[in-house]
Amino acid sequence: MGARAIVVEAAGAPEAMAWRNVDLPRPGPGELVVRHEAVGVNFLDVLMRAGRGGAAYPARLGVEGAGVVEAAGEGAGFAPGDRVVYAGGPPGAYADRRILPAARAVALPPDIAATDVAALFFKGLTAWYLATRIAPLGPGDVALVHAAAGGVGSLLARWLVHRGVRVVATVGSEGKRAAALVTGAEAVLVLGRDDVAAAVKAASDGAGARAAFDSVGRDSWEASIDSLGPMGWLVSYGWASGEPQVDLTRLRNAGSLIVTRPTIAHYTAARADLEAGAAEVFALIRAGVLRFEQVETLPLNEVVAAHPRIESRSMAGPVVLVADAP
């Protein structure tokens, strides 16, 4: 069996991605052959292509997809014809079909379209573990969410608001405020311009936030610390502006703050956790809580054109690559 897949021979610009005809072996025990219907494009893909994501070359790209099982190895737990979705695991989603460890696949319910779930499954699972598995947040608690106009940030803000958490959000520019406001955040500040900590303290009657969710890193680190109340959680899940310098004495003096650097790989490593997270993501898709106001779709064979859109950070929603019908 053969497949067409993107192969990156060496780190570079989007044009470094090239389609290749590749051999696809029969699936071994615990493996699936998945024919893609839709593939999500994530910033992680851009980093790996550009040489900043720890990839070994030649490299395959893409960590999120939805499609149909064409063949299943022994003990895979799926059968040909089953619809599945996955996020994480070995890269290789930029392909018309691929070998996938069955442990990373989740059955896709019939009422959820492949294009809809491919737009947000990776980001939605990230929002799930951030919102529900780390800081003990309940109705009425205040949380700070940075980059709330972005993919994960907007879904995280929506998820927290759905749980009754009061969200104060930041964005990188005035032009992104509207996109963050529709998440239900009570206030949206422009990072680097507005006094974020003052807004959080005002929203919390001076108590400070119970948690700060920070994917920005160096440029938002001090604002996150200053916004937290005693024993607050600083959840550092990304470093878009660079890795922050962690000063333990500063964390102690700011109120015995708790800092964690989580990744989706650890929070979905156990099959039970992956399935639990997926079930909650599916439920909130159905409820209309997890959604993007805009989703751009491109044919799968135009993946090279997708990366500049992601790198520009000017898009209002994600990019989904749609495969040709078989």
Image (spheres, rainbow, N blue to C red):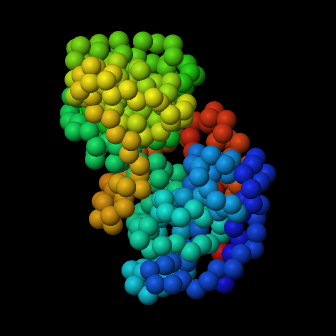
**Along the viewing direction, whichever of 303 and 61 lies nearer the viewer:** 61
Asked whether the viewer can see residue 302, the reply is no
Residue 118, given in percent of the width and then of the height, sits at 52, 56
Q: Residue at x 33, y 66 (%)?
A: 271
Residue 227, given in percent of the width and then of the height, sits at 33, 20
Residue 96, given in percent of the width and then of the height, sits at 65, 69
In which quadrant of the rendered image does the C terminus lie? bottom right
Q: How many marks do you count on the picture?
A: 0
Q: Residue at x 48, y 59 (%)?
A: 87
Q: Is residue 218 left or right of residue 165?
A: right
Q: Is residue 168 above or below residue 93?
A: above
Q: Residue at x 53, y 64 (%)?
A: 90
**Along the viewing direction, whichever of 224 and 278 lies nearer the viewer:** 224
Residue 115 position by quadrant: bottom right
Q: Is residue 7 left or right of residue 55?
A: right
**Along the viewing direction, whichever of 190 and 53 lies nearer the viewer:** 53
Residue 8, given in percent of the width and then of the height, sits at 72, 59
Q: Is residue 136 above or below residue 177?
A: below
Q: Is residue 117 left or right of residue 229?
A: right
Residue 156 position by quadrant: top left
Asked whether the viewer can see residue 12, the reply is yes
Q: Residue at x 68, y 60 (%)?
A: 57
In which quadrant of the rendered image does the N terminus lie? bottom right
